[in-house]
Every structure is written in structure tokens, then in C-alpha cells.
Image (spheres, rainbow, N blue to C red):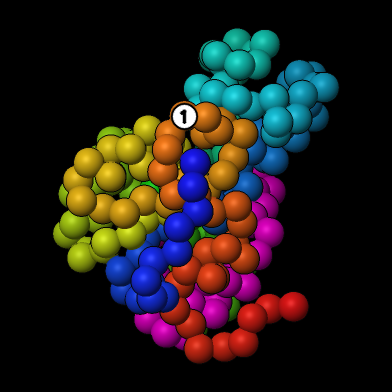
Amino acid sequence: MTRVSPPMPIPISEVGFDFDGVIADTAEAFIRLACAEHGYCGFTREDITNFELENCLNIPQTLVEKIFTDILTDSIATELLPMPGAVESLERFAGIGTLTIITARPLKKPVFAWLERYFSGPTREKIRVIATGDHNDKVRHIHQHGLKYFIDDRAETCIQLAREAITPYVFNQPWNRNRHELQTVADWGEIRALVAHAEPELP
């Protein structure tokens, strides 16, 4: 895994963002709900070493699917939180241009409801959301919207994008470690360092 900066800041019109695991802290919600509502406690984010959680946690696949379904269909009721720095960074980027979120979620409505809770009206008006319903169907939407860069936490998606002349940045999470040799970002501070914006750096 390497961190390589582009030769100049990336225009906001050329970069897209995944939602779960990059903008929204879906792992935190899963861990919390698994314990509080289903009694599966004692594991942390670091224990999630596989994108398919049933392959690394002692939780039945049916329960994994139920918890994720709860999160994806009602992100407000499940108290899905933003990743640290995501809201502040995207609010700043929205001052430059339109933001593009491409998610593998099948439904856009819960994403819009979540954005309404955490983002200002002017920023929400600058966000387009594409819900593909399939991790492997992001490429055509990225090309369709003229994006050249994409930030995602799923290593397999980023590997696919790299094969399609799209520059991916893997958002570091325990489930993508040692699964790729692509460029990475550790947090939203590193994303801000990549993307062009006019305001001074956050403290």
C-alpha cells in the first residue's frame, strides 16, 4: 500500500466518494447494533478483517444481513454517524463544485435522509447520489459522470476501478489491509490534501 499524491490537487468535479465506510461510519453502527440489540459483543473494528463479516466474526450470516439491512433502510433510526472529518470536508468541497457519491446501496432515500441530518441545505443541493445496488456496477457510473478518481473502502472495488482507467484511493480500514497495492488515504485530512479547495486547512 502506498500513498502517492497527484501532481496537482484533484478537481472536485473529477473525484467521487463511496458512502458506507468512507463518509458514514457503518462499522461503528454495526458493532453497536450487534451488541445492543442482538447480544453479540466483545469485538471491535480491528476484528473486522474481511469485507464479508461472517468470514471474520462469529456471527451468523443471517444476522449480519439483518443488521446491515436495518442500517441501509433506516440510517437515521440506527444512528449511523459520519466518519471523523467527513462532514466538514464535504461542506468545504461543496463550496467549489458538485459532489458525487456513488454507493452500492440499493436505495437512495435513506442516504438523502442522512445527508439532511448532517449537512447544510446549500451543501445538500450540491450533492448527487447514485445508488447502484451492486459493488461491481460503479465503473459505468463513474465514467458516465466524467470522474477520474474514486475513494472507496472496498479493496476489490478499487482494484476493479484501476483496471478501468480510474484512479482509486483505498480508504484505510481493517477489512482492506494487505488486500491490494493501491494508493491509500488514512482519513479525511489526507483526502483534503488531495482535493482542491480554497479554504485554509482545518486545525
Q: Which residue position is annotated with label 1?
A: 179
Residue 87 coordinates in the image, percent (x, y): 60, 68
Instruction: Residue 49: name its quadrant.
Output: top right
SS for tag 1?
Answer: loop
Residue 81 coordinates in the image, percent (x, y): 67, 53
- Name above or below for residue 172 compared with residue 178: below
Q: Give the residue displayed 64% in from the left and 38% down from the top.
A: 27
Which quarter of the image is occupied by the C terminus? Answer: bottom right
Q: Which amino acid does label 1 sit on?
A: Arg
The number of callouts visible is 1
Lateral position of residue 16 relative to residue 31, left or right: left
What stretch of residues is rendered in magenta? 76-101
Residue 118 coordinates in the image, percent (x, y): 62, 67
- Residue 133 showing in the rendered view: no
Query: Badge 1: how crowded within 10 Å, few (<14), some, or many (20+)?
Result: few
Q: Give the residue displayed 31% in from the left and 54% down from the top.
A: 167
Lateral position of residue 19 relative to residue 133, left or right: right
- Name above or below for residue 44 compared with residue 147: above
Q: Answer whether residue 95 is magenta in the image.
A: yes
Q: Which of 197 and 130 is in front in this view?
A: 197
- Residue 184 showing in the rendered view: yes
Q: Give the residue displayed 62% in from the left and 66% down from the top.
A: 189
Q: Give the residue displayed 37% in from the left and 71% down from the top.
A: 7
Q: Nearer the viewer, residue 77 or 128?
A: 128
Q: Answer whether residue 102 is magenta in the image.
A: no
Residue 123 coordinates in the image, percent (x, y): 49, 78
Lateral position of residue 128 relative to residue 77, left or right: left
